Amino acid sequence: MIVVACSGFPVPKSRYFREFEAVEISDTELGIPSAGTRRHWLREASPGFAFSVLAPKQITAESFTLSADHKRAIEEVATFAKQMKSLAVVFAANPEWGPSRQNRTRLREFAEHVLGVVKTPVLDLPGWPLGEAEAALKKLPVTLAFDPLLEQPAHNGELAYARLPGPAGYRSRYDNDTLERVITFCKGSQAKQLFLVFRNIDRFENGLYVSKRLRVA
């Protein structure tokens, strides 16, 4: 199954829920939405709509340290994700955070802790080659996010989580030829569930293009 999503709501939510089958909730980077907001989203979304959740930025901005505050934040976002019936919780690192010896140890310790709290954790490590991240995690059952235009995992598991940040960052735009490459990747994916997230400034238009092309295919 393939679902296409935007990170956050780039258009009014009522329109977004009509056009898409999934969303990566980004509000949670700064705080957990209220119970009323959660109920509203669940009520407005169509049956089978897929949610994922971004973890609080404070956790990843401070190099995945397991302070008491960070452990509490992990528990809070895990609870919210469960209430939303979310497919995953995404912990997104800064691109500058790379695979040093200390960071490999820290990453593994973080993953071991998070697996005991979050049902389906996803680690997005743009500063790490996928092979180095996999080696550091030593077969822990954590999903690694990836940009399919740059690098793809060697093995497909239950969940493949692809994030597209824009060809040159948030304010850049994908042209149709590049989007066709994304579509080709989606069609060839052997993952049981592929969650494809656009994060760039034109994420609504780019995501809609891919979503409609995949429905026709």
Image (tube, helix red, strand yellow):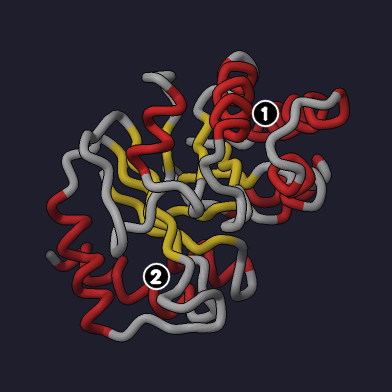
| Residue with the mark numbered 1 | 78
The foreground one among 89 and 46 is: 89
- Measure the C-alpha gap from mark 2 to mark 1: 27 Å
SS class, disc 1: helix
Q: How dense is the environment of label 1, judged by Cα within 10 Å: few (below 14), some, or many (20 and up)?
A: many
Residue 136's place in the image compared with 149, above or below, is above
Placement of 99 over or under 11, stated as above or below: above
Looking at the image, is 125 positioned above or below residue 5?
Answer: above
Number of marks drawn: 2
x and y percentages locating residue 55 in the rendered image: 67, 42
Name the residue at 15% across, 63% down: 184
| Residue 28 seen in the current view | no
Residue that mark 2 sits on = 207
Residue shown at 60% from the left, 75% from the top: 11
Point out which mark residue 24 bears. Answer: none
Judged from the image, the secondary structure of the residue bearing numbered disc 2 is helix
Q: Is residue 40 left or right of residue 31?
A: left
Hey, which residue is sitting farthest right in the picture?
69
Q: Position of residue 14 (x, y in %)?
A: 60, 67
Residue at x 57%, y 57% (from the top left corner): 95
Question: Where residue 209 sits: x, y (%)?
Answer: 32, 76
Q: Amino acid at mark 1?
A: Ala
User: In the figure, is residue 175 to the left or right of 102?
Assistant: left
Q: Position of residue 72 (x, y in %)?
A: 82, 26
Asked whether 62 or 8 is in front, the reply is: 62
Q: Residue at x 73, y 29 (%)?
A: 74
Q: Quadrant of residue 137?
A: top left
Q: Can residue 10 be seen?
A: yes
Q: Choose the circle earlier in sequence order: 2 or 1.
A: 1
Say what amino acid the circle numbered 2 marks. Gly
**Label 2 Cα neighbours within 10 Å, binned few <14 / some 14-19 / many ≥20:** many
Which quadrant of the figure contains the C terminus? bottom left
